[in-house]
Amino acid sequence: MMKPLNKLMQEGLVRLKDALILAFIFSALILCIGCNSKLSKADLVIINGAEPESLDPAIVTGQPDMRVVSALFEGLTRTDPETGKPIPGLAYKWDISPDGLVYKFYLRQNLKWSNNEDPITSEDVYWSWIRALDPMTASDYAGQLFCIKNAEAFNSGRLKDPSMVGICCLAPDVFVVTLNMPTPYFLDICSLPIASVVPTKIINRFGDRWLLSKNFPVSGPYQLEFWRINDRIRLRKNNVYWDASNVQVKTIDILPINSAITAFNLYETGYADIVWDKNLVPADLIDLLVQRPDFHSFDYLGTYFIRINTTRYPLNDPRVRMALAYTIDKQRIVSKITRAGEPVANSLTPPGTANYIPPSGLKFDPSVGLRLLKEAGFTNGINFPTLTYTVTASMAKYHEKIAIELQQIWKQYLGIDISIRQLEWKTFLAAQNSLDYDLCWSSWVADYNDAYTFLGLFESNSGNNRTGWKNPKYDEFLRLANTSQDSNQRLVYLQKAEEILLKEGVPIIPLYFYKGLNYFNPSKIQGIYPNPIDHHPLNAIRIISTNLSGNKLSIEPQKQSL
């Protein structure tokens, strides 16, 4: 018998109250730490999830890192907060040759580094990009610049002379880029951290420790006041930024809080103003909280998937990887665990990606999975070694729940055992990079609205591949797609590549497409918009009220209609 809606709402409010009581001690501890540090509260406090791995634009790969880096360093273009599309940044305009191969960027006049001493010139852009491509920098994102003439050869070490890379300075305020092929998303690439302009003079002076140098100059809307590990990052407005007049918030604290309950409690008490990411929404309360006007749900281009180390036995057999894929009931996961309306994913590239229709990969069919496992030599899972599924300890409750469900699913349908390993965020990334894992959770959010931002991850030379999987045919279809002048033919090449990824190689298993969820009080905060790439520039945020104590926007039980 169904319970009346008002009864359900009352039970939900009881759950909410209980969760707040249980979490109070954790929030009190954090607040006490803040008091003991004798720091005044910043104008805006954002809970950002994991502690950043780095603040070096050439090194960062995680979304928490990129949010901070994008506030410190700017590229020739930047991201429109409403649409997610590229708009003028350090360059105020550009010309594109008729064949789409040559871009001429014109830098703004009187651009200055935050030290208000040195100008930002095309030479700074040049050396920032050369540094990002330098193999000694070891950037996982360097591949994003491979559309530039000779960039890949320089990054691989086959070409030693940086002057042969297709970038040059025509004047202090004119920067020219020559591409290998027309790249419709090149202006999007120019807004990524990898293409940000960094202070090469400081980097040359301090080397790898340049981020530790006091008051290092930045090119973006904010400068780093300090970074206290496991405490906060404080950003202060860069008053000499070219668009400083439109940057309203003077100081921002970025908190590395990994507990969803603690994040929620800090928000409810008014200590934090914004909380990014669904991972920081208390999982047991999500069905209640998504109904509140300060919890904002939106669609964007992001996929949650399982990454597989294809170099390890028995995962080096594609039949084993396919067996794992065929036996996952994805609807069971989104209905039971994620519960925010996420669509199940049978492709890596989300529906709605511009000019692309993704093919469908392997769907739930346990009988096929069991047959493939038998063909691989493991009838009913007999003699199959125990595999380890790695999750991040910092967000273990959310990812571990999915891991436990997968553990049960594979035991039920394949008769195999899975153990679960928890690692801290930085250790987790290091394990991925060194292929020190069997299976692990992964996700990708589009850097720009094009299928290549997803499919390019698993090219053989991509630093973001992290599966050990290489397929020349896959690489070739992507190369053909990126050199095709015909948009319809490009679509076909991309689809053929994704079919290989999903049905033949299977180095990944897509689980679901993301449903964006962040929370902030719209009576206090504006300037955050839903966009396809889930990127929300900090310089666009506005504080419209500071008179509200706390962020408690409760839900009243609704009357039951007859």
Image (cartoon, rainbow, N blue to C red):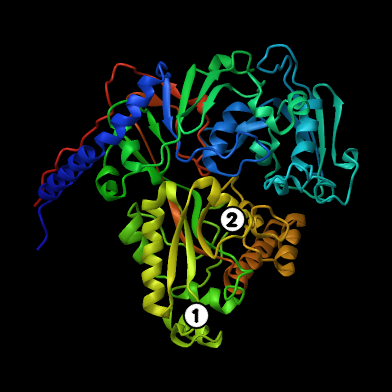
Marks 1/2: CA distance? 23 Å
Query: Residue sitting at 50 percent across and 51 percent down?
Result: 302
Q: Is residue 265 above or below residue 493?
A: above
Query: Residue sitting at 24 percent across and 32 percent down?
Result: 553
Q: Amino acid at mark 1?
A: Phe
Q: Nearer the viewer, residue 543 or 481?
A: 543
Q: Amino acid at mark 2?
A: Gln
**Residue behind mark 2:** 432
Quarter of the image where one finds residue 517: top left
Q: Nearer the viewer, residue 239 or 317?
A: 317
Query: What is the crowding at mark 1: few (fewer than 14 residues within 10 Å), some, or many (at least 20)?
Result: some
Disc on res. 384: 1
Report whether 81 appears left or right of 412. Answer: right
Q: Is residue 136 visible?
A: yes
- The quadrant of the image that shows the N terminus is bottom left
Q: Is residue 522 visible?
A: no
Secondary structure beneath dot 2 equals helix
Report whether 316 appears left or right of 254. Answer: right
Q: Is residue 32 above or below residue 310?
A: above
Q: Nearer the viewer, residue 293 or 287?
A: 287
Secondary structure beneath dot 1 equals loop
Q: Position of residue 514 (x, y in %)?
A: 44, 52
Q: Position of residue 82 (x, y in %)?
A: 50, 34
Q: Position of residue 95 (x, y in %)?
A: 77, 33
